[in-house]
């Protein structure tokens, strides 16, 4: 992954840490806000990212949303390679 791609990823993750108008934080994996929330199933529902397919599941849609928003979105390491100059 290039440095530029890592910076873009970092921006998406940090940007996703803020809730949107529907009270969802962005995906903890990629920062995307393209999410699918199926909380209408009788036995089990899920919240899934349409971009990277990160997901969580559970039986209560409100509990799932609280868990989704509580996931740490800044717990990754940005690797900046050492560039040698001749």
Image: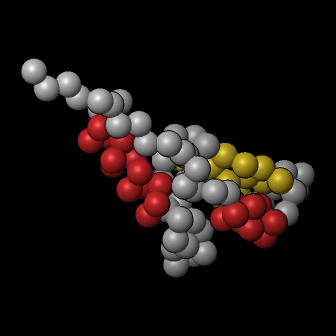
Whether residue 31 sits left or right of residue 68 in the image: it is left
Residues 43 and 70: in front is 70
Write the residue at 66% across / 46% down.
55
Whether residue 60 sits left or right of residue 11 in the image: it is right
**The C terminus sits in image quarter:** top left
Q: Position of residue 36 (x, y in %)?
A: 60, 55
- Residue 40's image quarter? bottom right
Q: Residue furthest top?
A: 86
Q: Residue furthest front?
A: 86
Q: Is residue 83 above or below residue 6?
A: above
Write the residue at 75% across / 61% down.
67
Q: Is residue 34 visible in this depiction of the protein? A: no
Q: Is residue 53 above or below residue 81?
A: below
Give the number of callouts: 0
Residues 11 and 32: in front is 11
**The N terminus sits in image quarter:** top left
Write the residue at 67% across / 57% down.
71
Q: Position of residue 11 (x, y in %)?
A: 38, 56
Write the residue at 85% across / 63% down.
60
Q: How is the image coloured?
A: secondary structure
Q: Position of residue 39 (x, y in %)?
A: 75, 61
Residues 8 and 22: in front is 8
Q: Position of residue 19 (x, y in %)?
A: 55, 73
Q: Residue furthest bottom?
A: 21
Q: Is residue 56 visible in this depiction of the protein? A: yes
């Amino acid at each position: 992954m290039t440095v530029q791609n890592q910076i873009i990823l970092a921006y998406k993750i940090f940007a996703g840490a803020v809730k949107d108008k529907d009270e969802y934080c962005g995906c903890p994996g990629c920062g995307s806000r393209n999410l699918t929330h199926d909380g209408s199933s009788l036995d089990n529902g899920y919240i899934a990212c349409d971009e990277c397919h990160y997901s969580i599941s559970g039986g209560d849609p409100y509990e799932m949303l609280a868990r989704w928003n509580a996931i740490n979105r800044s717990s990754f390491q940005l690797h900046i390679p050492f560039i040698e100059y001749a």
